[in-house]
Image (spheres, rainbow, N blue to C red):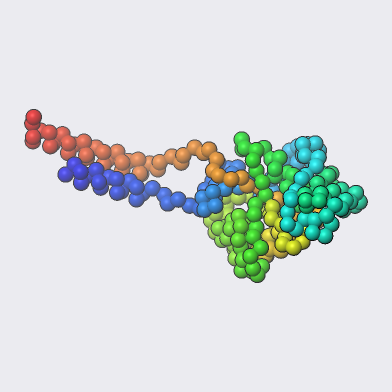
């Protein structure tokens, strides 16, 4: 009888535990993606939020990363190996091995909207110190087929997990997990992935139309959504009162049965 009660308790207890979800809030600042084992910032326009609180943010980013080193990459230098530019398109030097050295400037950012070019986004994410962590980066976005049907990579997978559907605005069509995030914009979001075959383009996705494409790394109209590898430390969710009461009841019954058995079978 004792074993039966304990077995029943374990069955009811674990059955009542909530199922593990793909997206789990870590406080109100971060969201853990258990499918891909990455953690996102909950604020999808965090750069704008930060610069509103600290107008010197762009200056501090440039000071911390005056030169952004990108590559070597199979797309970099295929046409302009050893090239350099100090004009309106931004200052850079490409080494013979294809490594791109981009000299950062305030022109890489558009603080009023929260948008930035790809170089600005990469520098911001990689210098981000947020929630006690400083190993943030831009997400991946795969180039794996037609723009309407292929959603590989971390950024594409997140939008699908939020209930997004190709060709439909995420702001209109989404699921309950959408509420875990805030400030999701109707515009392109940079990924850290290069556009295949184009040394000056990177992959981006637009939640408003749920489409993805390659964009020039110099254009200033895209946002950045940072993530980091792994989970973050979080306080376990408290047990529900009903579940706690059920557990105490089952333990009480088990102890009562044990006393009854001992009285019936004295040593």
**How many marks are shown on the rendered structure?**
0
In-front residue for pair 208/194: 194
Residue 104, by quadrant, is top right
Residue at 38% x, 48% y: name it: 17
Q: Is residue 90 above or below residue 160?
A: above
Q: Is residue 221 left or right of residue 153?
A: right
Q: Is residue 6 above or below residue 200?
A: above
Q: Position of residue 241 (x, y in %)?
A: 38, 41
Which quadrant is the C terminus positioned in? top left
Q: Is residue 151 visible?
A: yes
Residue at 74% x, 44% y: name it: 123
Q: Is residue 33 left or right of residue 135?
A: left
Q: Is residue 135 above or below residue 85?
A: above
Q: Residue furthest top?
A: 267
Q: Is residue 115 visible?
A: no
Q: Is residue 55 left or right of residue 254?
A: right
Q: Residue furthest right?
A: 87
Residue at 12% x, 37% y: name it: 261
Q: Position of residue 26 (x, y in %)?
A: 54, 43
In-front residue for pair 127/24: 127
In-front residue for pair 262/96: 96
């Amino acid at each position: 009888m004792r074993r039966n009660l304990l077995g029943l308790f374990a069955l009811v207890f674990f059955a009542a535990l909530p199922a593990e979800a793909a997206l789990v809030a870590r406080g109100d600042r971060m969201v853990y993606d258990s499918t891909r084992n990455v953690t996102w910032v909950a604020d999808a326009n965090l750069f704008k939020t930060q610069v509103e609180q600290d107008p010197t943010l762009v200056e501090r980013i440039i000071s911390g990363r005056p030169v952004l080193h990108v590559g070597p990459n199979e797309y970099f230098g295929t046409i302009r190996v050893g090239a350099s530019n100090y004009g309106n398109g931004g200052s850079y030097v490409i080494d013979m091995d294809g490594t791109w050295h981009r000299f950062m400037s305030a022109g890489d950012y558009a603080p009023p909207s929260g948008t930035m070019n790809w170089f600005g986004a990469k520098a911001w994410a990689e210098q981000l110190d947020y929630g006690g962590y400083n190993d943030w980066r831009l997400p991946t976005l795969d180039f794996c087929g037609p723009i309407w049907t292929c959603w590989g990579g971390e950024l594409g997978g997140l939008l699908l997990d939020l209930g997004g559907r190709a060709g439909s605005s995420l702001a209109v069509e989404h699921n309950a997990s959408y509420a875990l995030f805030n400030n999701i914009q109707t515009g392109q979001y940079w990924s850290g992935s290069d556009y295949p075959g184009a040394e000056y383009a990177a992959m981006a996705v637009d939640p408003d139309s749920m489409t993805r494409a390659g964009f020039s790394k110099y254009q200033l109209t895209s946002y950045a959504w940072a993530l980091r590898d792994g989970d973050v430390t979080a306080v376990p969710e408290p047990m529900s009162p009903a579940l706690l009461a059920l557990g105490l009841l089952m333990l009480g019954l088990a102890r009562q049965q044990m006393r009854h058995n001992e009285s019936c079978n004295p040593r």
